[in-house]
Amino acid sequence: MDNQVDGVNVSRVEELNAGHVNDVMRLIDRVGWSVPMERLRLHFRVGQVLGYFNDNTLAGTVTIFPWQKDIVGVGNLIVHPAYQRRGIGQRLLEHAMSAGDVRVQLIATDEGYPLYRKNGFQVTGEIVRLSRNASPGADGHPAIVDKNTRVYRVTRVSDMDEADLQCLIDFDRRVSQVDRATLYRGLCHSLDTYIITATANFDELGGAIVYALEGDRIRIGPVLGQTPAHARRLFETCIGDFHGPVNLDMLADSKELLSAAERAGFTASRTSPFMERVGSLPPLSNTGRFALFDAAMG
Ligand SMILES: CC(C)(COP(=O)(O)OP(=O)(O)OC[C@H]1O[C@@H](n2cnc3c(N)ncnc32)[C@H](O)[C@@H]1OP(=O)(O)O)[C@@H](O)C(=O)NCCC(=O)NCCS
């Protein structure tokens, strides 16, 4: 389907590699988004980043996160403004939808929404973007790195041994119903990503929170608990030790966690539709619906 002139592809979709990271960053800047370089590098490690080239210019990109055989996350679908409304976004999205009977999940912007609706995506949730500014008197140190208490333990993901990593992956799979092994293994290369774990009874994992340092901010990723109450308690315990600015995205129907965040001084800057195209597959539980990479860790 590529356009050919004298046997040479003038427009084509190609898988990108880490050598294209600056080109993708330029596209991201061009549409006014702010994605830290470290997170973009992580996308290259755990997802399949595609580029649409017009001649040799990168005109569009999409990242496909194949979490498990029936769940695919889509992130960073961007077409350079000079190339929009020529079918490039549609073509890139078709790559993400080409895996057959899978759930395709994404968080939509206002600009992306019409394209997704046209392709059969439905809004199945709402993502609340929460943030909290630095606490008064904070010394600027954003995280609770290296602070271990009786209740919880902080570990740099890259320092986890295989057994602990597998335990985390299994725990996540049990509580979220999604296998995010690819994500956790990809995080092992990120020096700025940490995990806080809490034990329940008899050394059993009761909850886990993943967070990344992004400049002077912390971005909290999945907050996992054996039950919503476990997740909330771990979150409340930890959040008191975060003194710098914090960002956190969550599904609006995670009611218990959302009220805890509001009590802890978080405010919602905006909400975005969580959209899915599920084909003939049954719907997932609330937590399973939040398998999407970008909101989970980005
Ligand atoms: C969303 C985006 C990727 C669409 O890319 P695109 O190449 O312009 O989209 P396409 O040309 O393939 O559009 C396909 C169809 O989607 C719909 N569509 C796309 N952009 C639209 C818009 N701005 N308004 C209304 N409908 C739109 C139309 O039905 C369009 O078909 P048509 O042109 O025949 O009417 C692009 O606008 C973009 O990069 N926006 C900024 C980044 C962003 O918000 N990305 C979405 C992340 S969730």
Image (cartoon, helix red, strand yellow):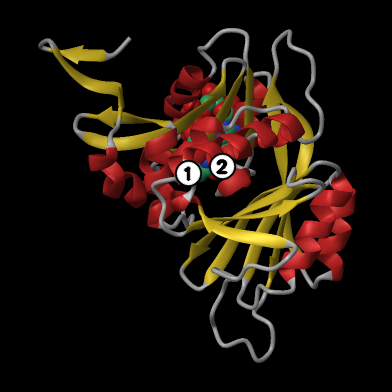
Nearest the viewer among 154 and 297 is 154
Residue 76 appearing in the image: no
Secondary-structure class at tag 2: helix
Name the quadrant containing residue 4.
top left
Secondary-structure class at tag 1: loop
Nearest the viewer among 84 and 66 is 66
| Residue at far bottom of view | 137
Looking at the picture, how far across and down is residue 203, in whole percent?
Answer: 73, 47
Name the kind of residue labelled 2 in the image: Asp
- Say which mark, if any, is on residue 26: none
| Residue placed under numbered mark 2 in the picture | 164
Q: Residue at x 28, y 21 (%)?
A: 12
Pointer 2 with pointer 1, Cβ within 8 A: yes
Name the kind of residue labelled 1 in the image: Asp
Q: Residue at x 57, y 88 (%)?
A: 139
| Residue placed under numbered mark 1 in the picture | 161
Residue labelled 1 has its Cβ within 8 Å of some atom of ligand 1: no
Looking at the picture, how far across and down is residue 189, in whole percent?
Answer: 39, 47
Looking at the picture, how far across and down is residue 67, in whole percent?
Answer: 56, 26
- Disc 2 crowd rating (10 Å Cα; few below 14, some 14-19, many 20+) is few
Q: CA distance from mark 2 to mark 1?
A: 6 Å
